[in-house]
Each structure stands twice: as structure tokens, then as C-alpha cells.
Amino acid sequence: MENQRPLILVSNDDGIVAKGLSELIKFLRPLGEVVVMTPDGPRSGMSCALTSHEPIHYQLVRKDVGLTVYRCSGTPTDCVKLAFATVLDRKPDLVVGGINHGDNSSTNVHYSGTMGVVIEGCLKGVPSIAFSLCSHQADADFTAAGPYVRDIVHKVLERGLPPLTCLNVNFPDTQDLKGVKICQQAKGQWVNEWENFAHRGDSHYYWLTGEFEDADADNEKNDHWALANGYVAITPTTVDVTAYGLIDELKAWFSDDAVLGE
Amino acid sequence: MENQRPLILVSNDDGIVAKGLSELIKFLRPLGEVVVMTPDGPRSGMSCALTSHEPIHYQLVRKDVGLTVYRCSGTPTDCVKLAFATVLDRKPDLVVGGINHGDNSSTNVHYSGTMGVVIEGCLKGVPSIAFSLCSHQADADFTAAGPYVRDIVHKVLERGLPPLTCLNVNFPDTQDLKGVKICQQAKGQWVNEWENFAHRGDSHYYWLTGEFEDADADNEKNDHWALANGYVAITPTTVDVTAYGLIDELKAWFSDDAVLGE
């Protein structure tokens, strides 16, 4: 029965015409019923942004056996929220973001619209996976990623994921993948982030660019290391961002402050 | 010497004319040299979004003793990145976001542009604090928050914060504050998130709205509980979102998958 197949909601941040999206759909169709609600244009770097100051809308683009595609005027996170409220007739079994054109490992997790899709799925209590390839090329080659995408999705459909956790999966840009590494988020920061152009008069404008400085580049536990060394990096990711280790120290900071509460 | 005073970078997501920003500046000026780089209009719900598809720019708005204000065409996160690259002559001692008009506790941490400011400050290795008040009113009353803002900022300037951690501070909308609670992020989800309006023909448009359902409303450890009960909620927050507890289980999932790496 078709409606017993897993229901998979897909979105991305590169928009509806991105090759990474059509490749992902191709990889996922054998595994379940696929519903796509995805931005009508590029929304890279949108993080978990919401559209709160204007209305959004969506349109049906394609309806086929096992595949329905909608485009949406909102952000990646809007797409997930709106799909749950409108076009899905039941809670999906899986939310998938990607395949992103570009690396979402390390601290990029905070800026990524692909992760915006997946964090929203996770907050809604659905197992969720982000897939990204370390290439910004419009014609990037996703071939080698295919068997991994299918294997990871199959495992998650079968076993689920614990509450409040999701997967951030990144592929190096090579057809010679060395296998999977389970990783932690590399620490580091972006530097030289703005290209400065002279404009009229004394004014300037600034385009975002930058280089990532890995604070601990030789650490084999890190996703950034795994990618640099040809491995598929799976970084389990939490949406509970409480810094539990700091709670007791902060309690001590405020133990004498009863006066503020009088 | 003025340039030995702490250097405090301020931004927000409600934009340069928000009352919460001017109140925050008033509270902070006695504590250090304040530089403001803030969006030229509302950017609520922008999370850690970046502007990557167009250039951004900034202008000086005000220069006074101990206070310099710039407005910027970008997102809250852009504002922090651009300030570091342009107007700051040294690494700031503190990055502060707010005071937001609206609750950024619980899962709102993921959508908040105020937290976008603070996560960026934290990623750049600077102690960072977000302040928010649970009122969306343009004329919200921030009076009672003042002594708490000053006390918390004073403590953080004195003691610092551990790497990769920042503070998410929320005030209930009351002048009768009961004191500080050190909290964890409440779990739950937004429901009834879209208001649906008929448009021309068969089409519709959707405005974001919603109600937060606390999954564990009676848990006194949660920021959502603290706010509902009149306390200032301080939720220590990490930018390392690795789900460390899931690493061993995932390693077991992939232990037999050597074939994928061949």
C-alpha cells in the first residue's frame, strides 16, 4: 500500500532548481513517498530564519506517483513549518535537507539554511538529516554520495533518532570516499570575512566572503578533519543548546543577589 | 583613560529605532565604551542568517563621548561580523544583543536574531549576552530590567565566560521581578503557526503566528517556567551543538559498513 511507505519531507536552501535537490529526490524516491516544499530561489546562509514581517505563499509544481513538489516564497524553516500545516496529511517519518551545494560542517552549522530545515524537523519531533557536499559548483557531482544517502536514510527510518537530536552529514568533494566518520563539530572561526568595494563618494559596500580557521585542525574527531581527509562526516547535532556545565557556576555568581529580588 | 574602559559591542534585531536598544545603551554606558552596529530596520526571527547574495553597507549615525552608533543594511549576524572587520579598533570585551521586544527563551533561541548577535560574538571568542523582555509592545517598560542588566554585565566583564558559551537572559513583562533563576532551555514546540488568508482565485497567503506548547510546563528548571513565575531567566547557551551522547551509538550503526568505504 503506497500510504504505508515512509513519508519523507524534503527541503533545501539552494532553491528549487538546485542540482543537489534533484539528486537528493532521485536518491530518496526508492525509499518512500517524497513531498518537497522548497524555496523558490536561493536562501543560502539563512540559518533558522523565519519570515515574520510579510506573508508567504506556495504553489504545486509537480505531482507524480510517490513525488509531490511545491515551491514556497519563504525561508527553508518557513518551508518546513508551512508543509506541516498545509500539504502533509500526516506527520512525516523523516525530514531531509539538501543536498546542499557547500560545506555545512564545523561552525557553519549555525548559518546553514539546510540545517534550518533539519533543526525545524527535529523541533517538531521528526527524525531529521541534513546532507551537504563541499562544493559550491552548480554542476557539482553528487554520484558518490548516493549510496551513503540511501544507507543513512534507511538506517534512520529503521532505528529513529533520540529526541532533540538530528544528523548533519557532509561529503567531501571527491568520488573516492573513504567511508563514514562519526564526528564532533570542529571549533574555529571565519576570518577575512568581507570584501570591501568603493562606492560613490566616500562610501563602501561589503560582500561576504572569508576563510575558515580551524582552531584544532589535527583533531581526528572533528568533522572538518574528516572532510579534509576524504571521509563522509556525520556530526550528531542537538537542538538543546543549554550549556549544562555552566549552570552550577552561574548559580554561585548569583547566590548573594537576593537583594535584586526584594 | 577612556580607552582602558571595557569596549562593548551592541546590536539587536528590532532595528535602530527600537526602544529596547536605547534602553540597553542607557544601561550600558556607565559600564564601558559602547559601539552600536545595528540593523536599519526590523530583523526579528532572523536567527544567525547572513547576507550572502547581495552587498551590505553601514553609516555612522551618532558619535558622542563613550558612544558611537552605526546602522547597517544587513542582518544582526552581519552587523557583528561587519563591526569586527571595520569600526572596532580592538577586540571588544563584550558583545550584547537586545534588549529584544519579545521572549527568546525555550526553542525561540533557534529563531532569534538577538541570539544571532550573541552566537556570533561567542564564535569570535568574546563573552556575549542576549537580553530580551517578554513583551512585543513598542513602548514596553524596561525599567525593572535595568539593575539586572547592569549586574549581569558587570559580572561577565569581571569573570568572563567559558569558551563556546554565552548567556540568553529573558525578563518577564512585569515590574515586580522575583530575582534570577539559572535555567535550562524549555523543550516544546510551536503549534497553529500560520494564519491563512484567501487571496485572488484559489490562492492563499500565510502569516506566521502560533502558540508555544511547553512539553514540560511544570519543570522549575526551565526558562519558560521561570518567566511564567516572575523570575529573570538566565539560560547558559553553547555554540557547540554536537550531540556527544549519540556518538557511540552512531559508531555502532556504521561498524559493518566498511564496504561503503572500499
Image: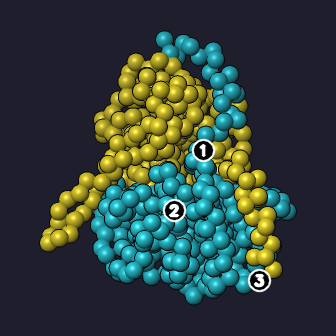
Chain colours: A yellow, B cyan
Give the letter of the chain under mark 1: B
Q: Which residue is mark 1?
A: B241
Using the rendered image, report if marks 3 and 1 lie on a common chain.
yes
List x then y, in percent, for residue B169: 65, 66
Q: CA distance from mark 3 to mark 1?
A: 35 Å
Kindly report which numbered mark, 3 or 1, lies closer to the viewer in this rendering.
3
**Real-space Cα separation, disc 3 to disc 2, in angstroms:** 28 Å
Chain to which the residue tagged by mark 2 belongs: B
Q: Dots 3 and 1: beta carbons under 8 Å?
A: no
Residue at which label 2 appears: B94
The structure residue drawn at horizontal position 72% and vertical position 71%, both measured from the top left corner, is B232
Amino acid type at mark 1: Val
Mark 3 and mark 1 lie on one chain; the one further toward the N terminus is: 3
**Image quarter hosting the N terminus of chain B:** bottom left
Q: Can residue B113 be seen in this snapshot?
A: no
Tell me which amino acid carries mark 2. Answer: Leu
Q: Nearer the viewer, mark 3 or mark 2?
A: 2
What amino acid is at disc 3?
Answer: Asp
- The reply to whether residue A243 is visible in this rendering is yes
Q: Is residue B107 left or right of residue B258?
A: right
Q: Which mark is residue B208?
A: none
N-terminal of the two: label 3 or label 2?
Answer: 2
What is the total number of numbered labels drawn onto the structure image?
3
Image position of A169 with respect to B129: above or below = above
Disc marking residue B176: 3
Element under disc 3: loop
The mark lying in front, picked from 2 and 1, is: 2
Mark 2 vs 1: CB contact within 8 A: no
Going by the image, does A28 lie left or right of A244? left
Disc 2 on helix, strand or loop?
strand
